[in-house]
Amino acid sequence: MAGGGDELKLLATWFSPFASRVKFVFHLKGLSYENVEEDLKNKSELLLESNPVHKKVPVLFHNGKPLCESMVIVEYIDEIFAGVGPSIVPADPYERAIARFWVSYIDNKLVAPWFQVFRGKTKEEKAEGLQQMFVATAVMEEAFRECSKGKPFFGGDAVGIVDVALGSQLGWLRASEALSGIKLFDPAKTPLLLAWAERFTALDAAKASMPESGRLLAYAKMRQAETDAANASK
Ligand SMILES: N[C@@H](CCC(=O)N[C@@H](CS)C(=O)NCC(=O)O)C(=O)O
């Protein structure tokens, strides 16, 4: 793998879809990195010191300097290693701004409601989150049509930041589908997204960076049971 004299260390947890975003880009570009597994139930001094604002993974240490927030890290890697492997941030300022718009939409309108469904205290709260997720997947179906212009990825012929932002969530979305029996990516309603998800998951960089599906499902079941028990005892 490439990486030159740069030291790349990633503070992550195996199940974090946000850490997967960063791992995906490392693998896409063929960059070597050291993975440091964090215990989020007993956060390390390193995490608390390096991400004092959010206290969350992922944190990238590039030659010892920390950087937080998955998509900030993803764009940073793409810029610093511009000559290494494929580029995922559009060169054209307008295209770049549009891609960032969709990245922000994914985090605010799909991932945030997903948390509400997974962690929601009441049935109403969960149902509202799910409703928002259905709206967001329908919107992303149209976004895919516009961004891809008939090509395989949001980024066109190759993956871009929108693919990375959404693709990294697929493991958890599928685990949630398996737990609830609800189909978020539906062959009738979101055929383009469904086909895109298959293509994204088949990429070598996705296989290398996404959590193993059986392990993730078992973990999601355990977390769901923990959350439900905690909510029931309140
Ligand atoms: N917006 C952040 C989200 C990161 C995030 O939520 N990380 C989770 C793991 S999946 C975490 O560290 N949670 C610890 C906590 O909430 O205390 C990003 O994109 O990096």
Image: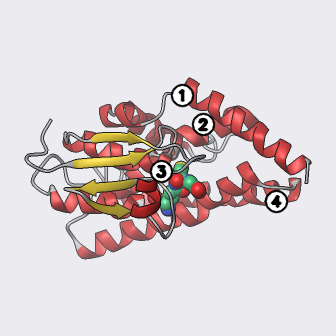
**Amino acid type at image mark 4:** Glu
For disc 3, the neighbor class at 10 Å (few under 14, some 14 to 19, many from 20) is: some
| Comparing labels 2 and 1, the label whose residue is closer to the camera | 1
Residue lying at 42% horizontally and 63% vertically, measured from the top left: 49
* Horizontal side of residue 95 vs 13, given as left or right: left
Is the Cβ of the residue at disc 2 closer than 8 Å to that at disc 4? no
x and y percent of residue 173 in the render? 60, 42
Where disc 1 sits, the SS reads helix
Q: Tell me where residue 80 appears, x and y as whole percent.
A: 16, 60
Does residue 14 lie above or below 218 as drawn? below
Q: Which residue is under mark 3?
A: 44
Q: Earlier in the sequence, mark 2 or mark 3?
A: 3
Residue tagged 1: 213
Query: Which residue of the protein is positioned furthest toward the top in this rendering?
Result: 214
- The three-letter code of the residue at mark 1 reads Ser
- Percent across and percent down for residue 2 are 12, 40
Label 2 sits on residue: 174
| Label 4 – label 3 distance at C-alpha | 32 Å
As drawn, 32 above or below 90: above
Please tell me which residue lies in front, 232 or 143.
Answer: 232
Q: Nearer the viewer, mark 2 or mark 4?
A: 4
Q: Amino acid at mark 3?
A: Ser
Residue at which label 4 appears = 125
Q: Residue at x 74, y 40 (%)?
A: 224
Sequence order check, earlier mark of 2 and 1: 2
Q: Nearer the viewer, residue 1 or 138?
A: 1
> Gap in Å between the C-alphas at discs 2 and 4?
21 Å
- Asked if the residue at tag 3 contacts the one at tag 4, i.e. Cβ–Cβ closer than 8 Å, the answer is no
